[in-house]
Image (spheres, rainbow, N blue to C red):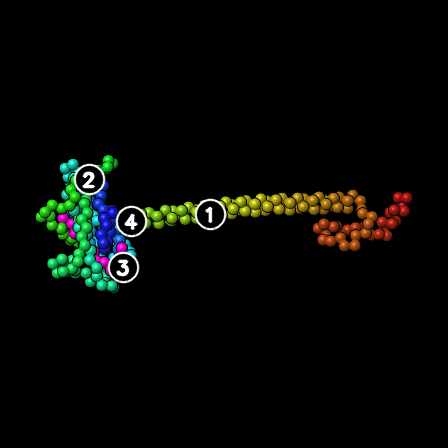
């Protein structure tokens, strides 16, 4: 951690896991240890290589602010993975209620009599998967100039940000498609279960209808046999002794029964 009277930064070095042709970012957290509003500005010795967001801002009393430093994709690695790039963090007290839009370059001008606190940060490349070899330099050499990274290679940075956003959207679409597939699978299973249930009910109804027809046919056979039996009894002179009060339809009960008086005469003769 790099500590100052106004702001402290964590980490004290900007470490990038170096990879060729790949955009790499690292995070820098600024902490305001005072009860005052503190404005900050981040500069770099190589503004075309790095992009800082935000490169200026205001940290509220007893609060923190995160700064993202992005290194543009590099076509070749530096000798021995040593980096001479540096960053400069400037901070100054400002009036309460000041916003980032109110910050001007004059606020960080020491010649104008402003009390500006400065903190230098080194850049360290980490060679994956081995541990990075840190640079031996403690500070910038005389004549090294710092510049803010606000306008550093804006086209490349915008391209990288757009690719990152498209990747997130692709992940969201993939999650939505997965949820839709799950829902469709559940509906398919429910439809199959309902189809099986309807098929079972249909088979049961068909079997019940067949059994009912068989039973009906059996009863018709019984009635037909009874009818034939009654006709046989009538034709061969075999009569019932009981009196039929309501013989029913003529097709089941013949109407030519022997009268009772003649039945009695025939009975006396037989005796």
Q: Residue at x 42, y 46 (%)?
A: 185
Q: Residue at x 25, y 64 (%)?
A: 97
- Mark 1–mark 3 Cα distance, whole angstroms, equals 64 Å
Q: Residue at x 26, y 55 (%)?
A: 32
Marks 3, 2: nearer the viewer: 3
Question: Which residue position is annotated with label 3?
Answer: 35
Q: Are marks 1 and 3 in contact (CB under 8 Å)?
A: no
Q: Which residues are magenta?
A: 33-45
Marks 2, 1: nearer the viewer: 2
In the displayed structure image, the side of residue 262 where residue 49 appears, left or right: left
Q: Earlier in the sequence, mark 1 or mark 3?
A: 3
Circle 4: element type: helix
- Mark 4–mark 1 Cα distance, whole angstroms, equals 34 Å
Determine crowd level at label 3: few under 14, some 14-19, many 20+ residues with C-alpha closer than 10 A.
Answer: few
Specify the label residue 134 is tagged with.
2
Circle 2: element type: loop
Question: Which residue position is annotated with label 4?
Answer: 168
Q: Earlier in the sequence, mark 4 or mark 1?
A: 4
Circle 1: element type: helix
- Residue 46: x %, y % from top left: 14, 48
Q: Is residue 38 magenta?
A: yes
The foreground one among 228 and 242 is 242
Q: Earlier in the sequence, mark 2 or mark 1?
A: 2
Question: Which residue position is annotated with label 1?
Answer: 190
- Residue 260 in sight in this render: yes
Task: Assign the C terminus to one quadrant of the image.
Answer: top right
Circle 3: element type: loop
- Mark 4–mark 2 Cα distance, whole angstroms, equals 34 Å
The foreground one among 257 and 82 is 82
């Amino acid at each position: 951690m790099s500590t100052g009277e106004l702001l402290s930064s964590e980490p004290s070095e900007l470490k990038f896991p170096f990879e060729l042709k790949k955009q790499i970012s690292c995070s820098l957290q600024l902490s305001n240890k005072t009860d005052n509003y503190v404005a900050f500005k981040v500069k770099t010795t190589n503004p075309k290589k790095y992009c800082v967001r935000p490169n200026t801002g205001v940290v509220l009393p007893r609060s923190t602010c995160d700064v993202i430093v992005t290194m543009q994709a590099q076509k070749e690695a530096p000798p021995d993975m040593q980096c001479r790039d540096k960053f400069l963090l400037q901070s100054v007290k400002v009036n309460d209620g000041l916003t980032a839009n109110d910050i001007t370059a004059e606020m960080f001008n020491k010649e104008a009599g402003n009390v500006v606190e400065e903190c230098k940060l080194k850049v360290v490349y980490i060679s994956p998967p081995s541990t990075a070899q840190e640079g031996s330099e403690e500070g910038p050499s005389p004549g090294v100039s710092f510049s803010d990274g606000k306008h550093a290679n804006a086209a490349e940075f915008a391209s990288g940000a757009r690719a990152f956003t498209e990747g997130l959207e692709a992940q969201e679409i993939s999650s939505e498609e997965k949820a839709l597939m799950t829902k469709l699978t559940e509906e398919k299973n429910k439809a199959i279960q309902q189809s099986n249930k309807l098929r079972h009910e249909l088979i049961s109804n068909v079997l019940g209808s067949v059994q009912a027809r068989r039973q009906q046919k059996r009863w018709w056979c019984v009635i037909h046999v009874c009818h034939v039996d009654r006709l046989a009894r009538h034709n061969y002179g075999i009569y019932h002794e009981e009196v039929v009060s309501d013989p029913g339809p003529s097709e089941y009960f013949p109407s030519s029964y022997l009268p009772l008086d003649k039945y009695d005469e025939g009975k006396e003769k037989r005796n």
